[in-house]
Amino acid sequence: MKPSDQAWTDEEIAWIDELLMDEDNGLDQPLFSSEMDGFLCAVISGPKLIPPSEALRWIFDADAGEQLPRFANPADAERLMQLVMRHWNHIAASLADGSYDPLLMQHERADGVLMTLFADWCAGYMTGVGLDREGWRSLLEGEGALLLHTMLMYGTEEGCEALERNPPSDAEHEARADALADEACAIRDYWFSLRVASAAAAAPLEAPSPEQPCHCGSGRPYKHCHGAN
């Protein structure tokens, strides 16, 4: 993978979270690193292309996309933009080749069991879905929702309430965490194929040369068929 497509390092993840968490920067509800990874994954995967300038507003303000930071050091703002765009490229490339690995955190419980934390990632993903909820409708309703099942379960208030009523076993929880990468790639492939098909249908047909067979399938030369007029 090119340097411009490299995933964040642990040091960069810590720097991003510390910067966005700093109260002096004036952000009430920013997306931290794991949430941001899920958010960007959804934005890049979805039914329509969303420019980074639009996505960035929601990284700073996950509630309304309105609050902007007050970085005292312009170099911090520049570095953050560079890191976000590099991670954008990384996610796009890894989703395309099937190597995407969600940025998930781990937590050691009091009993010593190490658990994967992915509710934040799922919440970030659903924030990305919310930027074009109407476009995502086919995966939010009916059978299509199976692809989004884990994101809906762990990344929405309704899903979290359902988990509280019927909590999964540790094994089920970890299995869902392990499946996130494949699910994210499958969703990207679903929307990508639809975008490609839509673009192909909208592209004008080039007329064949006069001696080529007519595109209507008649078998006659184009100049003697639809090209005769």
Image: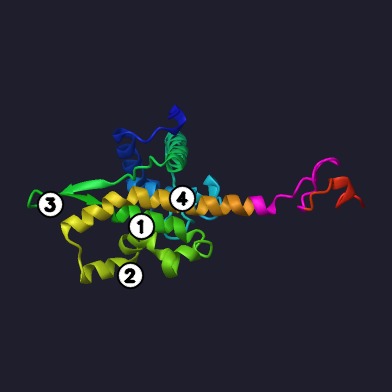
Mark 1–mark 3 CB contact (< 8 Å) = no
**C-alpha distance separating marks 2 and 3:** 25 Å
Say whether residue 198 is left or right of residue 46.
right
Mark 1–mark 2 CB contact (< 8 Å) = no
Per the rendering, the mark at residue 123 is 1
Which of the two labelled residues, at mark 3 and mark 4, occupies the earlier sequence position? Answer: 3
**C-alpha distance separating marks 4 and 1:** 17 Å
Q: Position of residue 93 (x, y in %)?
A: 46, 38
Quadrant for the N terminus in the image: top left
Instruction: Provide the secondary structure element on which disc 4 rests.
Output: helix
Looking at the rendering, the stretch of residues picked out in magenta corresponds to: 200-217
Which residue position holds label 2? Answer: 158
Query: Which residue type does callout 1 highlight?
Result: Ala
Mark 3–mark 4 CB contact (< 8 Å) = no
Per the rendering, the mark at residue 70 is none
- Whether residue 210 appears in magenta in the rendering, the answer is yes
- Whether residue 63 appears in magenta in the rendering, the answer is no
Which of the two labelled residues, at mark 1 and mark 3, occupies the earlier sequence position? Answer: 3
Foreground: disc 3 or disc 4 = 4
Q: Which residue sits furthest front?
A: 219
Which residue position holds label 3? Answer: 109
Which residue position holds label 4? Answer: 188
> Can residue 29 be seen?
no
Which of the two labelled residues, at mark 2 and mark 3, occupies the earlier sequence position? Answer: 3
Query: Which residue type does callout 4 highlight?
Result: Arg
Which of the two labelled residues, at mark 4 and mark 2, occupies the earlier sequence position? Answer: 2
Which of the two labelled residues, at mark 4 and mark 1, occupies the earlier sequence position? Answer: 1
**C-alpha distance separating marks 1 and 2:** 12 Å
**C-alpha distance separating marks 4 and 2:** 24 Å
Query: Which residue type does callout 3 highlight?
Result: Arg
At 43% from the left and 43% from the top, the residue drawn is 95
Q: Which residue sits furthest right?
A: 229
